[in-house]
Image (tube, grey):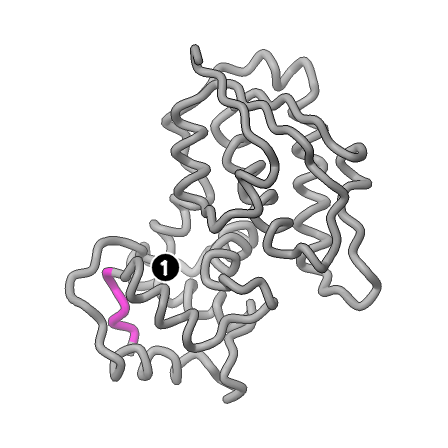
Amino acid sequence: AGGVASFDFEEVCSQPTGASDFIAIAKAFHTVILHNVPFLSMERLPEVRRLITFIDVLYDHHVKLLCSAAAEPLKLFQADKSAANDEAFAFDRTASRLNDMMSEEYKLKQHNPTAATMSEDIEEAAGVAELHHELCREEVDAIWNSYDKDGTGKLDKGELRQLMEDLSQLKKGHRNVRDAVVDEAFLTFDTDGDGTIDKDEFQSFADRRGVSIWYVV
């Protein structure tokens, strides 16, 4: 009530939530209370990625955060030595933002419900918008084959970056796509959290969200 929302970690991060849900929360509430954030590991990678996105969105909108957690921010996520550096790096940024959100300087910031977010940057940079027409399987195949350069049947983050840079060039006239934007786009596509984008996930995204300028083929 009164611009304050309270959530349990599982409500926010263990459900099939995404950036659009978090943006709606950040626009509606100036203060969020998040309960029961547990220790996190690679076995809970989808939840780790959702928490990263959630904190990024709250931070961009200057939302005040009250949080109960199993440890201080830098000790919450334990990545094993075989883990990709992407998740560890991204969570380090999240931990830094959580620490910043506890500072007096951050607490004095005014809630900014109209802030541009990384998710909205994705929409701008990658042309995510309402479908001009439904993509048929042949169109998705053509796009997929253009960017699955190594023929593995999976898109890695580098291949997704290439796609996003091409779309940015078409729509905005430059290829500057921030690392954080690529990270969040990758999370949006990688619904099973296995660290790659398979063709079914790619097709599902096209069916679900669509893009206005898939005409890169």
Q: Specify the principal SS of the magenta part.
A: loop
Residue 10 shown in magenta: no
Residue located 59% across and 41% down the image: 10
Q: Secondary structure at mark 1?
A: helix
Q: Is residue 9 toward the left or the right of residue 120 in the image?
A: right
Between residues 73 and 126, which one lies in front from this camera angle? 73
Residue located 28% across and 69% down the image: 214
Residue located 43% across and 64% down the image: 165
**In the image, residue 192 lies at what x, y percent?**
54, 64
Residue located 39% across and 43% down the image: 20
Q: Is 59 above or below relative to 171?
A: above
**In the image, residue 146 lies at what x, y percent?**
39, 82
From this viewpoint, which residue is outermost toward the left?
133
From this viewpoint, which residue is outermost toward the bottom?
151
Q: Is 160 above or below relative to 20?
A: below
Q: Is residue 144 toward the left or the right of residue 211 in the image?
A: right
Amino acid type of the residue that numbered disc 1 sits on in the rendered structure: Ser
| Residue at which label 1 appears | 168
Question: Is disc 1 surrounded by few (<14), some (14 to 19) or many (20+) residues within 10 Å?
Answer: many
**In the image, residue 57 lies at what x, y percent?**
50, 36
Q: Quadrant of the C terminus?
A: bottom left
Q: In the image, which residues are magenta?
A: 212-216
